Image (tube, coloured by chain):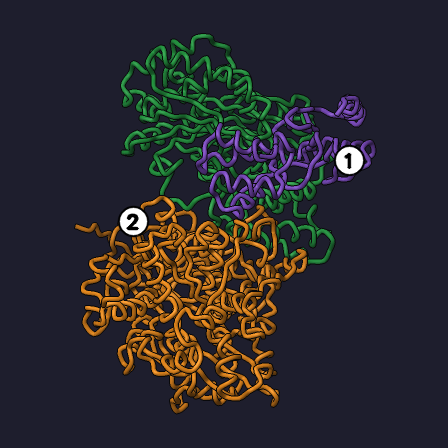
Chain colours: A green, B orange, C purple
Amino acid sequence: MAYSYQLKRVDFIFRNENDWEKVLSSTIKKKPDEIINELISSELKGRGGAGFPTGLKWKLTAESKASDKYVICNADEGEPGTFKDREILSKVPYKVLTAMAVCGYVTGAKEGFIYLRGEYKFLEKELNKVIDEFQYYCKEINLDFSIKIFMGSGAYICGEETALMESMEGRRGEPRNKPPFPTQAGYMDKPTVVNNVETLVHTWTIFKYGAKKFYDLGVQYSRGTKLFSVSGDTPKPGIYELELGMSLQDFVYEFGDGDTKAVQVGGASGFLVPRKKFKDTAIGYEGKLVGISLPTGGSMMLFNSSRSMFNVLDNYLEFFREESCGQCTPCRVGCQQLLLGIKAVKRGEKPAAYLDKLLKLTETMQLTAKCGLGQSVANSFSSIVENFREEMIY
Amino acid sequence: MEKKVNITINGLPVEVKKGKTILEAAENQGIKIPTLCYHKDLCVAGNCRVCVVEVVGQKRLSAACATPCEDGMEILTNSLKVRNSRKHIIELILAEHNSDCTKCYRNGNCELQDLSSEYKIMTQDFIELAPLKNYTIDMFSPSIIKDDSKCIRCQRCVRTCAELQGVNALTVAYKGDRMKISTFFEKPMNAVVCTNCGQCVNHCPTGALVEKNYIEEVWAAISDPTKHVVAQTAPAVRVGLGEEMGMKPGERVTGKMVAALRRLGFDSVLDTDFTADLTIMEEGTELLTRLKKALVDKDPGVKLPMATSCSPGWIKYIEHLYPEYLDNLSTCKSPQQMFGALAKTYYAKARNIDPENIISVSIMPCTAKKFEAHRPEMHDSGFRDVDFVLTTRELAIMIKQAGLDFEKLEPAHYDRLMGESSGAGVIFGATGGVMEAALRTAYELVTGREVPFENLNIDTVRGLEGVRKASIIIENPLEEWAFLDGVELKCAVAHGLVNAKKVMDAIKAGKADFHFVEIMACPGGCLGGGGQPIPTNPEIRQKRAEAIYAEDSNLPIRKSHENPEIQKLYNDFLIKPLGELSHHLLHTTYTKRERF
Amino acid sequence: MNPIQSLIKDLVDQYGRNRESLLPVMQGVVRQEMYLSEYSMVEIAREMDIPAAEVFGTATFYSFLETKPAGKYIIRVCKTITCAMKGKNQLLFAIQDMLKIKIGETTPDKRFTLLETNCLGWCHKAPAMLINDDVYTEVTPERVREILSGYMKEII
């Protein structure tokens, strides 16, 4: 083998386990500090894409002093190419609820919300049934924690945690200035933990099997497993739980159709990796082992040589142009400029060198946009334009 | 003890209070960081991003307006990274903005223009967006023009309308590339809850929101030899106009303004302060009448507290949002409209001019006055009572167009007949002024003695606190007013409609037992009006307020009822306050409106 | 009280009068009426004591809160990358051809409204579409004709 890591399939997340009551009651017998330390030692990082250490997030919220605190499960899964959270919520929702309740116990929050994207409305009914059952058990063991579903209404940006809270407060989902961070002042200005659906399920794994079990999976800086949503030109589209740290070459070997030209890692806000870089790319958080490493919310889109990278970028940019909240200049105007710009170059109305101006623009967007959306448009834009420049030009 | 943090800005060590933003810390050091969405009157938005600075060690740049200083921060406000990004952002804003500067009303007084000039944006590589969107200019309002093609989405207008005014006529609508500043359902400004106060115009950094100007119409009237053009000037104009003419805030330019108006060709230069005094006579009498009906006759139909009606922004606000309280409004017209009605009756008769040939122009610190003059009921003289309303800014434009060297003008006096005023009329321009003027007169009317305050300065109703409460106990009244003996007259003063809302909600909740409330739509009262010079901020308004009170104390007559021209008006024409003619010319009615 | 007023009043009674309830209330109106009319927004504003312009501004932020009249069934075809790669346009053509409407339009019988939408989260089973809350995946032009025929048989 020319590369050192192989794909390691695992099965934790969707393992059907009927002992959530036991996991919950035994976990909350521990002291909050103990639970936090366990999470910290597991080195679990947020699985929504940003990769903030989960234990630290819980700790900061636990330390914030306030009468009310909240736990929010971010199920506003909108990144193109991700669909894992939907699967979790339909297959193992009780794991998510248990994790939320433990988080409430650890941080002192009494209320939890699942912010469910409007596109997943069909999940609401079943989920509410599970919640009812869960609440019943909480009462039985005298755990004061309630969970409600808050439905989104079609806005990608609400996956950004402060936008999500604005939305829950009945306003436009526009990201807030940070600081303050949600752990200090989140929903209703109270300390709030916002965790991605998958992150919560990983905490369940840690509660049940111990931090060491989790830590032993994956590689340095990127511990544990991760759900990958695989789509595009692949014979095996679907959701797969894999250990972190794999090389993209292995991934393509497993999932490619034999003609994979490029893989988009991390959705439209992630990076496009061309064939020649598969070998040098590892999937995990920063702190590299093999060549470059890419964090990801788990979206893996494969493109074979029949695809035009111009069309791919055009599609992403149209997505961002529409889904930008529109409040900050670099993102609102920047996305429009990028989209119009590549079209103008493609039509020959602007010189090829205009692409360099647009690349500089993405740098500015990355440096100055108010939230992750505007900052990350640069990722796909620069990785596509730099690697497939010839496809962009007339 | 206040916590301090130590930071460096461009290498200079600085100690700042914890919680201060980078922008504030830099400003204290005399380092200007450019801003667009930031405004001292408003909450921080952090959305234009031109104020980005580099915090050494951080991957991304930070918005100086929205980032609090943390101990040990090394801040660079002018590094290459900052400069490049900032320039880029300005270019982006310009790509979205209709940059046809030479044809813009705000040409020469535009924050975006200044910024692009400072940063020498000489090229436009980005694709212009405005032509791609089907923008229309909303010109339906008699007061305000909204041009979305010039909007830079800083949302200052939206925050102004919500935070200062509590009106929320403007909102942010849609998202992404379609995001825009909009009214309810994108209706024209004249069809929504907009009070025409013009604070959005005052706070707009560009020409997206401007007043509808009537400059050419007024020039045409002045040039028409068959017309007798009368000007009236509102109290607050004389403490604001100087700023437009290059002077510092707080300069009193009454005499120069009168001289300028005469040089512009107005046939008669008169004073709204005169009708301010008249308002006191009418409104003071109305208040006492209401008190008598309430306290003596126990008439359940009489509404208290009585609220002032001078501010047309406030009137439209209550019509939209608290229509059940319309009967609490004083029926008095505003001084502008009293003047208008008299100009074409009393003045016309006295000067022997056919009222049809009188063009009545008012110079106001206000955009809502334009709407007020357009109200269908304001035709009591048999003609349109006020023909054109100009803001302080429009007057400044006319003075500049006429080529007058304002600073060199020899101060002049108002013409007679409706040109005389008291200090009480002048302070109408500041929040609390109507209340103070009314108390000076009413107290004396009732007791025969001056109000018991040193130099007649009723300090308890002055100041810039949003809502102020005061009371005055009436002792030993004259026989006619014996029923008021020992009554504690309770008053409230509010300015900025968000504060009006507080007062109204308290009244609605039954938690307020005021007899008289003064409400001005704009922050600081008329001196902070939507037609005043741009920029505005709390310090500037403070300076203008000081100038107003200085003007008052310098006048020989300080009480409305002592104004000899007012006495003459009653003797010769009106007979008595609330008399039949007053009722016809000086009082009005109000209209219930929709709440959006 | 007319039906819309009582619908809104019921929703507000159910979810509460504070601002946090605005989205659930608007969603409730859309569930019933398919869109938020000018009138419903004014009523929501009145009932919840929120400025009407803010109700409008908030509603227009969310693509599932329609502010234009819509049919009983809103078809939302995913247009994001994988669905676009897997034949979303063919799907759209089939629907347009069958219903004789373009994107953004509603059939004259007010039964269907055709819209495009961003990623629905079914990329592994592209192309996908929603009809109201129901998901259809791996939709071919043939299948979409069947699906729509089913809806058309329904009596409205």
User: Callout 2: residue from which chain?
Assistant: B
Relative to B571, say whether A57 is above or below. Answer: above
Q: Is residue B549 visible?
A: yes
Q: Position of residue A376 (x, y in %)?
A: 52, 43
Residue drawn at (23%, 66%), measured in percent from left and top? Answer: B479
Front position in the image: A130 or B61:
A130
Q: Secondary structure at mark 2?
A: loop
Give the quadrant of residue B330: bottom left
Q: Nearer the viewer, mark 2 or mark 1?
A: 1
Toward the left, the furthest residue is B1
Relative to B14, say whether A108 is above or below. Answer: above
Q: Is residue B403 visible?
A: no
Real-space CA distance between mark 2 and mark 1, rounded to the nearest whole angstrom: 59 Å
Relative to A96, say whether A119 is above or below. Answer: below
Q: Position of residue A95 (x, y in %)?
A: 45, 17
The amino acid beneath tag 1 is Thr
Q: Is residue B438 left or right of residue B84?
A: left
Q: Position of residue B456 (x, y in %)?
A: 23, 72
* Residue wearing tag 1: C107
* Residue wearing tag 2: B70
Q: Secondary structure at mark 1?
A: loop
Label 1 Cα neighbours within 10 Å, binned few <14 / some 14-19 / many ≥20: some
Identify the disc placed on residue B496.
none
Q: Position of residue B453 (x, y in %)?
A: 20, 69
User: Callout 1: residue from which chain?
Assistant: C
Label 2 Cα neighbours within 10 Å, binned few <14 / some 14-19 / many ≥20: some
